[in-house]
Each structure stands twice: as C-alpha cells, then as structure tokens.
Image (spheres, coloured by chain):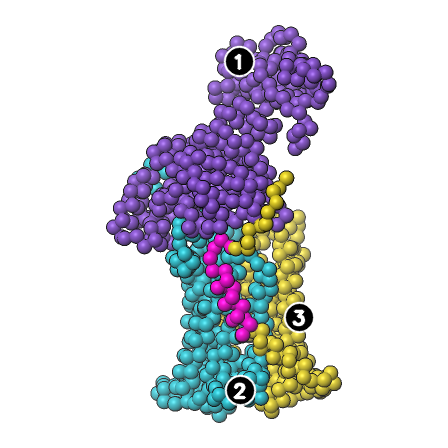
Chain colours: A cyan, B purple, C yellow
Amino acid sequence: MPVERLQAAPVEPERRFRQDPLLVRVPLILTGVAIVAVLIVIPVVNVFYQALSHGVGTYWRNLAGDPDTRHAILLTLIVAPTSVALNIGFGIAAAWAVTRFQFPGRTFLVTLIDLPFAISPVVAGLMFVLLFGLQGYFGPWLRDHGVHIIFALPGLILATTFVTLPFVARELIPMMEAIGTDEETAALSLGAGGWQIFWRVTLPNIKWALLYGVILCNARAMGEFGAVYVVSGHIAGQTDTMPLRVQKLFDEYNNPGSFAVASMLTSLALLTLLAKVWLEQKTRREMAAGAQNGLEPAQSREVRLESL
Amino acid sequence: MSIAVKNVVKRFGNFVALDDVSLDVPHGSLLALLGPSGSGKTTLLRIIAGLERADQGSVLYHDEDVTRRSARDRNVGFVFQHYALFRHMTVFENVAFGLRVRRAPKSRIDARVRELLHLVRLDGFGGRYPPQLSGGQRQRVALARALAVEPAVLLLDEPFGALDAKVRQELRQWLRRFHDEIKVTTIFVTHDQEEAFEVADRVVVMHNGRIEQHGTPQEVFDHPANPFVMDFLGNVNVFQGRIQNGKIVVGGIEMAYPEYPHGESRAATAYIRPHELDIDRSPVDTSSLRAKVIQVNPNGSVAKVRLESEESELELHVEINLERYAELGLRPGDLVHVAPRRFRVFFPEDYAI
Amino acid sequence: MKGPGQPLAGNRRILPGFRLSLGYTIIYLTVLVAVPLAACLAKVSSLTASQFVSAVWTERARAAYLLTFGASFAAAAINVPLGLLLAWNLVRYDFPFKRVLDSLIDLPFALPTAVAGLVYANLYVQNGWFGQFLVPLGIRGAYSRLAIILVLTFIGLPFVVRTVQPVLETIDAEIEEAAASLGATRWQTFLRILLPALAPALATGFALTFARSLGEYGSVVFVSGNIMFRTEIAPVLIVNQLEEYHYAEATAIALVLLAGSFLTLAVINSLERWSRRYAG
C-alpha cells in the first residue's frame, strides 16, 4: 500500500534578502567576530591557559590533591542536583496547573514564578538569612533544636533552589500550551487516570523541553555565587561550593588553583551550550510536528479507501 | 444504549452555548447534530461525553443519571475533530491505549487491536506513527482507538471536516455501512447538511443553542418547522406578502391558501425551494410571475437558473431537470414565467430572527 | 424561559490533578518566595522612617546606587549596538563557523559569574593578555569602574542578541525591496525602516540587560576591587552590612534594589506588550 510520508513543516522560512555589498558585509562580519572573540572566546581560552600554566601535574594536584577543593566539588555535586530535582517537581506541577486549567489569579501565579529572575542573588541570600540566620526570625528556634540551615548544607540548597526556581517551569509552560490538551483529553475519554495520563501521554510529549529546562537549571545551579555566598559563611572545607572556592583561591593569590576549578566550571558551561543547541533542534521539531498533527488535510490523490 | 438529555444549559462566560436543550437518542440509532458554527452542537456532544459539565440539566444513559460522572467512567468512544492521536505512540499503541490503562492481558490486547485494525482496513499499519499517516488514515486510527474498549456510545466531532472531498465521500459511506454492522448508538456532529442526510437515521437541527427540529432527514427537509430550518437545509426563495380570506399574495403572485380563511389580513412569508418552482414560456393564470433569465448553470443532473422578477426585482433561484431545460432552450435575457408548485408559509412575527 | 435550578456543584475541571498541582505549586511558592519576601518587608518595617532613610541614604550608599544604576545603564547601552550588530550578522549573512558563533553568544548565560569575574580581572590587569597593551595607554580594565562596565557587558551580551534575532528573522524582505525600488539607499532603508521596526526589540533587550546587571554580584566582586565610594556596587554594600550583622540596614538597601528591579520588570512587560502590538 503506497503511503506518502508527510514532510515535517519547514523550520526556517526561505530568506531572500538583498545581499549587502561585500564592502559592507565584510567589515560588519569581522567586527562581529572580533566582538565575540574579545568578549567571549579569548576569556575562555585564557581560563584553560591559566589553569594549565604550571603544567598538567599541578593542574591535577590543584583539583584532586587539595582536600578543600575536593570537598567543594563534592558539595556542588550535592547541592546542584538537589535543587534541580526540587525544581523539576515544582516545574511540572506549576506547568500542569497553569496550562491545563483556568482559575482566577493564574496570571499572577505566572508572574510569581518569574520573580526569582528579578531578584538579585545577594538579596535572595539575604532573605534566607533573615529567616534562618542566628538573628533571624527562626534563628533561636533552630538553635534550640540543633538545626543548622544558614552556614550549612540546607541553606545552600534553599538559596540555590530559589535562584533557579523558574528555569524548568519556564520551559514547560510554553511547550504544554503549544501542545494543547487534546491528547490528554482523548486519554481521559479512553479511561486513563491522572498519573496514567501524565506518564503515558504528557511526559513523552514534553521530554525535550523538560531536559532543556533541566540543563539550564543545572548550569545556573552549579555556577550560582551571590546567593550561596551570603548563606554559606564560606567556611573552607565545609560550606564552599565550587564558585566560592574559586574566589577563595583567588583571594589567596593561588591563580593556578583558582583557574583549575574555574576550568571545570567552564567545561561544564561549554557542555551546557552543546546540549542546549542539540535540544533546541529537538524542541523545534516537536513544536512543528505538534502544529501539524491532525490539522494537515490529506493529500489529494486518486485512491481507494484502503489506501487512504 | 439509549441516551437522554434533559434541560441542559451551558454558558461560557456571558455566552449561552446551550439554552434548555432536551433530546432523546434511541438505542442503536445513528444521529446527526447539524447546525452552523456556534449553534452548540459540539458543546452538546461534549456534554454527552462528559468532556464538559452542564451548568444545569442532566444526562442519562439508559435511565441512569451520569451527569456528574467523569468522562473516564462513562465508557464512551469519542473521536476528536483533529483526531488527537498520541503522536509518540505507534498506531498499534494508540489503538491499544484504552485496553492498556485498564490493564487487560497482553494476549487480549494483541487480538483486539489486530481485530480493529482489520475492521478499519489498516492491517499492517500497526508500526507506523501518526505523522506518517494521511488524514483519512489518522481518522480511522482514531475510530479504531475509540472502539477498542467496546464503548456503549460512539461520539464523533466533525469526523470528516479536515479531509478532502473525495475522501470525505468515501468515509461517509463507510461509516454508514460500519454502523449497520456494529449497531452501536452513534452521534456525530456536522455543519454539512449533505453529510447529515446521507449518513444519519435521524437529524437534529440546532441553532443558537437550541434544537430547531428533530426528525428523519426526509421529515426535516419536507416539513421544516421554521424558516431557519428551511433556509439552512438547502436553498430557498423567500417572498414577502400578505394573506387573507384563504388566499396569499406574495411578490406579485396570488395562490390559494385555505389554511387561513380569516378576513383579517396578516403579513406572511412564503418559502419555496428551487425545485418547487416551474418555468414556462407562457403565463399560468394569476399564480405565475414574469421574470427575466439572468444566468443558466447546468450542474450535474439539474439546471440551476437564476432569474430576476420583473415586478419586484427579486432574485429567483429555480432548479429544473435537464430535459425540461433542453425543452425550453433558455438563454440569458429571455422573458419567462415562473410558477410555484408547492410553498410553505411562515408568519414573520412568530420568527423574528 | 430557562427552568429554575441550582448550577451543578463546583465547575470542576475535566482533566484530573487540579487540586494537587495547584496546591503543591502554591505551597512551594509560598515557602520559597512569599515567606522570604515577607521577611524582608517585616524586617524593614521594624525601622522607623528616619532610620530607614539614614540606612539607605548614606553617602556610601548613594555612591553605590549611582554606580550600580550607572554601570548597568552603560552596559545595557553598549549592548544595544553590539547586540544589534551580532544579530544582524547571524540573520543576514553567511560565513564560516557561523553556527559556532551563534552558540557561543549564549556562553555568558551558561558560565558561572565567578569564572567570568576571575578571568576578566586576569585579562585586564597590568600583565594580563589585554592589560599589557591597555594599561600603558591609561585604560585600566581591572579594579576600576570601566572594569565593572566591561564585565556587565559580557554578562548581558546574549540578551539583546536573542531578543532582536527573532524579530529580524521575520521582517519581510519585500519591505526592503520596496524601499530600494523607491530609491532609498541601503543606509536610508536601515535607518528609516529597519531600525524603527526593531526599536521595541532593542528596547526590551536593553531593559533585560539592565535588569540583569542591577543584581549582578559574582563577577563584579572580582573585577571591581570593591573600593568604597568608587567601585563598590550596591550588592557588595548589602553583603558588607550583613557581615557586620546590620540586618535591618542591609534589608533596607536590598529593598531599594528590589524596587529598582521590579520597576524594570514592569517596564519590560509593557515593552513586550508594545512590541507585540507593533508586530501585529
């Protein structure tokens, strides 16, 4: 049975701009490249240059041989994924509530979700100190019960979670709006319950957007400085995350050490960029396919019913 | 399973989508909800399915009140206008979905899915994905999926709306034959009068959230309850005039109307279908109209003639069969006489639209 | 006409999970956002009006505000032509490694600010890769106000580019062809037709960069030297107050900063509405 494969909608429209003359194009392109080179490329190269400036051996020792640095790496690897996990749960719940239902205050809720973006990280840290610091509102109660939040791991997680709160939700909300509720309603009419609908129908449709949000959330979580600085008390070997470690080593005039840790963070950033590009392609294709699913009229052909 | 809708009201903000609608659907019938956009037909269908909640009124399945029951628990098969196939699942998985969420045993799922794919003539398509299918194929997958769980009711929302004319034709006939085979109570929504008439046992004409008329296609067409129904179901010529003493005078013609013998003169409107008007070269006493031929359009099995009445400049649409057309040898500019064979009268004040 | 009757109890939604998802969302936001913000307001309200003023209006604080807002403004202003140029290159021209360039523009977004600060400080000091040329010329790119502007420009680079790019991509080529056929030079077309069409996007990009720069801390602490009255930004001042346990004063200054951020956010929202209307 001959079946034509439907083409995916083209992602970029054909552009037929008048080409600017070479005399205009070349300087503009070169200037652009120069800007990126000076502002972005050379700094990145410099990071690795400085990190390896005393040889690979020293580089390795700075990372693995220094117990405080090792601890900082470990701490980051605990704090960031925890914050990301918390924000995944939140992002999914928020996206479901906002895109699948109408209720008063919906717009306000969405604005609230964006709020952490507008708040300086230092202020974010400040807020948690006001709540849980020694002189904070809950300070005495916490001290009496031996619970440490500020200057300890929970505080780091709280501050990081706050700062990265919007990332996953902001990716899921437009995605779930675009996909629409038809498939989920169909699943309901076929007898599926809430979790069944989510796992079998919603999740497969949003998986790339979710992954994208997670990648961005993680990059930000691992690199967060200001908020964590305020709540950590920066006790080396205990509450320094990697970015804080970078600063501490810098203050101690240990450039190779500082840059060694910085190089790890930079590698992470570059990996994040790669993942971002790859996922952007995937999400674009999903959106195009979604817009076309069921809405495209059948190709006009002379065929019998069976081969339709 | 029979369905009863009682006094259903549904509002979206200030817009009244359904205004005190009641309907009885006998078990095993094939019913069309027919009407223009905004008439409330899709809303009614969705309320029957449980995909919308009525603000007032009730829905009964076989005398059981299901108004508060979730769509999930109503055991309906719903086919969405844009199919709503699960884009990440194969055709097989789509059809199997209802059974999987009920945790049916694997062997039963396999057998049933294969059975259904065969029923909708999509054997061998199990491994494909929705984006790889044509519109007609997706339509049939949607149908198979809805039928997989053996619903008591099948509801289709503009099932053929997004398809080509030829595909639509074939699927219509297919649905009719299919219904005769499986005999599940079926309701479908359409704005296409031809489709409703061709497929359904009974037609419900809706307008502005109300049911205008309910009956077999023949009943509704031949005995429209009001001007809207008459106008919606095909072309109609409208003549304004007055009636008195058993006679009606509209647009220059006088006809007997014994149903109104009273002396009191009343405004009346006569509705005449194009095929209920005859064209002649010579006048037919007082009940014929002089008119000039403007355009002739032989169209399939009839000739559609457009004329302008001499007296009132009213545009007339007449349909005559091809033999008569050949007999008359009509050409634009010809002066002829138009006489009604049948007409229907409605009083304007009863039907302020 | 309509029968009497009560509307059915609760217009419960069709899809499941409303209460669960909304409930969890609200609780989460309350705990993480609403309560901390409330703590800020509570702390500040413990000050009398005059105490508040004396906390936020010291000479040192004023210098910090001026610097924060000034540097953010400058960085945003620089990013407008820079971002426009880059967006133009990406949308209108083809050149080798264009996609690499496109991806790199997002790096400031992905890079930890501490790393940015570290490397920028390193590049512009006397013996740094750039500093060795610039310092003799009198251009001090580290431990100065220029340094702050420089690193804020880096941080804000993606914003204008990513805001202008989509708008540039959807500009109809025919409009430019029409202008050309009417005799306009390339430059005139750019000035009179393209620039006005891009104005909303540029304004939005500016506002986004500005907002981002207002709160920036991690990178600036490395490059500025944090010299009181000269290169101390408001967030640094807040941290200093905190370390001296002047919670209320720190919160007061934080509130000033917050007010600035929220105001900018409101401006961004109305700009986005403006650009949507303009784009039709």
Residue at image coords 58%, 70%? A115
Q: Residues within 10 Å of mark 2 (few under 14, many from 20)?
A: few
- Element type at mark 1: helix
> Pointer 1 and pointer 3: residues touching (CB < 8 Å)?
no
Q: Which mark is residue B162?
A: none
Tell me the quarter of the image containing the N terminus of chain A: top left
Q: Are marks 1 and 3 on the same chain?
A: no
Residue B152 in the image, given as x and y percentages of width and height: 39, 42
Q: Residues within 10 Å of mark 3 (few under 14, many from 20)?
A: some
**Side of A303 relative to A218 (left or right):** left
Image coordinates of residue C205 in percent, x first then y, are 60, 66
Secondary structure beneath label 2:
helix
Residue furthest right as drawn: C50
Query: Residue A155, image x and y in percent?
Result: 49, 82
> Is the C-beta separation of discs 2 and 1 under 8 Å?
no
- The residue beneath circle 3 is C263
Pick whichever, A278 or A35, lies toward us: A278
Quarter of the image for the C terminus of chain A: give it: top left
In whole angstroms, how far apart are the C-alphas of marks 1 and 3?
77 Å
Q: Residue at x 55, y 81 (%)?
A: A128
Task: Characterize the magenta stretch by its predominant secondary structure.
Answer: helix
**Residue C222 highlighted magenta (yes or no):** no
Q: Which tag is nearer the camera, tag 2 or tag 1?
A: 2
Of tags 2 and 3, the one toward the viewer is 2
Estimate the x, y position of residue A98 in percent, counting from the top left: 53, 60
Query: What chain is tagged by disc 1?
Result: B
* Residue designated by label 2: A141
Examine the rendered structure and indicate whether residue B184 appears above or below residue A101: above
- Going by the numbered disc 1, the residue's amino acid type is Tyr
From the viewer's side, name the closer residue of A140 and A287: A140
Dot label at residue B325: 1
Identify the magenta region. C13-31
